[in-house]
Image (spheres, helix red, strand yellow):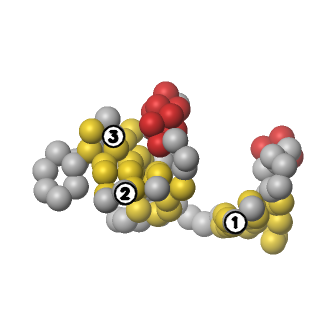
Amino acid sequence: MHPAGGQLPQGQVFHAAGPSEGGWTIPSSEISIFKRPPVSADHTLAHFEVTDIDAVVADVESGGAAFRDYTEGPLTTMGHIATLGLARAAWFTDPDGNDLGLRQG
C-alpha cells in the first residue's frame, strides 16, 4: 500500500504497516488506513480541519461529492455550511456512503 504516484507534499511521511494497512503523518495530524470489507458508519466517520471552508466545499462539490443539507432543527445549512458558534461545518458522503465532515474555526 502506498500513496498514488509515491509523491507526498513536504512534511508528510507515509508508513506502510503491512500489505493491507498504512498511514500518513502530516504535521500536527495522522491518518491511518486499513483494508477491510465494505462497511458504512451511521455517524460522521472523520472530519477535516480547513482554513477556507467555502473554497473547500466548492472544490469537493465540483468533484461530485453530495453534501448533506439541513433545513430544520437546531442545525441548518446555507450553501452546505452550518454555523456552530464561532465554527463553520459541512458534511458530505463518500462513495461508500460514509459521512465526512469539514470544519473551520
Q: Gap in Å between the C-alphas at discs 3 and 1?
A: 27 Å
Q: Residue at x 47, y 48 (%)?
A: 94
In x, y percent, where is residue 32? 67, 67
Instruction: Assign a secondary structure to mark 1.
Output: loop
Q: Is residue 62 above or below residue 51?
A: above
Residue highlighted by disc 3 = 80
The residue indicated by pointer 1 is 28
Residue 54 position by quadrant: top left
Residue 68, quarter of picture: top left
Per the model, the C-alpha gap separating discs 2 and 3 is 17 Å
Q: Does 33 sit left or right of 77 as displayed?
A: right
In the rendered view, does 51 fall on the left or right side of 67?
Answer: right
Quadrant of the rendering where the N terminus is positioned: bottom right
Q: Mark 2 = which residue?
A: 86
Element on which disc 2 rests: loop
Counting other residues with Cα less than 10 Å from the Cα at mark 3, is it few (<14), some (14-19), or many (20 or more)? some
The answer, for residue 2, to whether it is visible in the render is no
Question: In front of the other: label 3 or label 1?
Answer: 1
The residue that appears at 74% across and 62% down in the rendered structure is 27
